[in-house]
Amino acid sequence: MTEIALPAFPVEGGCICGAVRYRITGAPLAVYNCHCRDCQRLSGATHSMSMPIARDRLQHLRGELVAHDKPADSGRTVRMLACARCGTKLWNEPLASPAMLVVKPGTLDDPSWALPIGNIWTASRLPWAVIDETQVNFPGQPPDRQPLYDAWSAATT
């Protein structure tokens, strides 16, 4: 298993144009890739990255956000938050899990430490997208994210 060195918290991030800034005050619960069709479309790539954190660990420092509620492939509703000026998607608010946010790690000022430890929605991955079978992987929405959290915890200790 790859060992992941976490940065000293807090860490910061923001949108492309610089209008929105945020701070994360503590370690995330995990970092993983999502291969659902919605993430493929939203990212314009084979997948998007997700970094769930406790809501109280994210501080919105400045900038106007715009919200869009989207029904997810799982059937749940996800509120996506983006910069009102440039449209950069920064984090999701899973309405079914109000104590959690799902930050997009590519919006961190330094995302180099945000190494994914698993994949979800692998059944809808593009045929040429490579999935590391040694990671924690789910063909669809995991019934519980705890295996992802456990893998992250093991990789970061």
Image: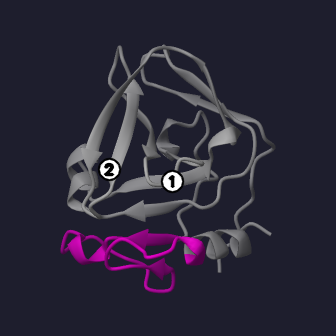
* Residue at figure coordinates x 60%, y 27% from the top left: 22
Mark 2 and mark 1: Cα distance apart in space: 10 Å
In the rendered structure, which segment of residues is drawn in magenta? 118-147
In the rendered image, residue 63, in percent from the top left (x then y), is placed at 50, 14
What residue is at 42 percent from the left and 16 percent from the top? Answer: 17
The numbered mark at residue 77 is: 2
Q: Main secondary structure of the magenta part?
A: loop
Compare marks 2 and 1 and give the one earlier in the sequence: 2
- Residue at the extreme bottom: 134
Q: Quadrant of the N terminus?
A: bottom right
As helix, strand or loop, the secondary structure at mark 1 comes to loop
Q: Position of residue 96 (x, y in %)?
A: 44, 54
Give the residue type at disc 1: Ser
Whole-percent x, y for residue 71 in the image: 25, 50
Q: Residue at coordinates 62% horizontally, 69% vertically from top-left?
A: 149
Q: Look at label 2 and name its amino acid.
A: Thr
The question of residue 64 being in magenta is answered with no
- Above or below — where is 25 with respect to 150? above
Q: Which residue is mark 1?
A: 97
- What secondary structure is found at the residue carrying circle 2? strand
- Image coordinates for residue 140, horizontal then vertical, percent: 32, 74
**Would residue 128 be counted in the magenta stretch?**
yes
